[in-house]
Image: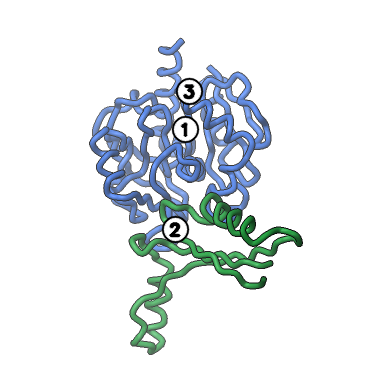
Chain colours: A green, B blue
Amino acid sequence: MKYRVFVSLKPTVLDPQGQTICRALNGMGHHWIADVRQGKYFDISLAEGVTREQAERDIEQIAQDVLANPVIEEYRVELLEQ
Amino acid sequence: MKFGVVVFPGSNCDHDAWWAVTHNLGHEAEFLWHDDESLGNADAVILPGGFSYGDYLRCGAIAKFSRIMRAVERFAREGGLVLGICNGFQILVECGLLPGALIRNRGLKFICRQVELRVETTQSPFSSEFRKGQIVRIPIAHGEGCYVADPRTLEELEAEDRVVFRYVDNPNGSLNDIAGILNAGRNVLGMMPHPERASDPLMGSTDGLLVFRSMAAALSLAR
């Protein structure tokens, strides 16, 4: 089983990197780009034998406690491979 | 008086902090390894600047899970004095001993220069030796020093007189120009500027030494 966890800044938190990328894109002539938000993702592969229920509980916990800082970031978990 | 200076893999201001305490302040200091379980007989703890665990994941995010931090958290909750400088401040917000977060500087650049700070309160064991409103010169050196918190937290910090240092000319976009804050118990201070780099006369300013002097004064009162 394989999961992907996306982490990005909350919409209310300033993202100066995203803003800089947006300005660069505008400067290249892509005038229709209105906003860019930068984030990151983690691909997590699980060992054989774990149930989906157990895996999802663990991944959720890991995303909350480690991968994202809930003060400034939000996350989304996606199943990549069964 | 004995100060414990925590050393994480990637800390790089640990020796500066040790020097400030031993040579400039004239007290004892000892290094505490990140994998240690105990703070020994330290009377106060310093989390120094640097790049703990390479700043991987987020600044301070991995350090929060190190063994020594369990002891530091216990020490802080029991009222022990904890000073987090720069990366140390980032670790303190990551582990929840201080509210808010530190994100990438508004201008994206790593900024390393002397800045002016205004001392906003002397009602703390870290700032009693300053004068309220005093302007001090202490250097910053960070890429992720923009302090953010939700409006309610900011209101609380201001109402409870927990902002100790404010930038005179905000270099990084920090909300309310915040450079250093206290926890509710006023025994934990996190600050982005480096007082240990402004403690020796050779360094051009000794304003930072007053932070350590304040701590020593508070500790001797407590004895």
Tell me if residue B97 comes above or below residue B111 in the rendering.
Answer: above
Q: Secondary structure at mark 2?
A: strand
In this picture, residue B133 sits left or right of residue A43: left
Q: Secondary structure at mark 3?
A: loop
Q: Amino acid at mark 2?
A: Glu
Residue B66 percent location from the top left of the image: 62, 40
Per the rendering, the mark at residue A73 is 2
Q: Residue at x 43, y 68 (%)?
A: A17
Distance from disc 3 to disc 2, alpha carbons, whole Å, reads 30 Å
Residue A7 percent location from the top left of the image: 50, 63
Distance from disc 2 to disc 1, alpha carbons, whole Å, reads 26 Å
Per the rendering, the mark at residue B78 is 3
Q: Residue at x 63, y 31 (%)?
A: B32
Q: Chain of mark 1?
A: B
Tell me if residue B17 comes above or below residue B222 in the rendering.
Answer: below
- The residue carrying pointer 3 sits among few (fewer than 14), some (14 to 19) or many (20 or more) residues within 10 Å by Cα, namely few
Residue B2 percent location from the top left of the image: 56, 20
Q: Nearer the viewer, residue A47 or B40?
A: A47
Q: Residue at x 55, y 31 (%)?
A: B72
Q: Looking at the image, is mark 1 or mark 3 nearer the viewer?
A: 3
Q: Are marks 2 and 1 on the same chain?
A: no
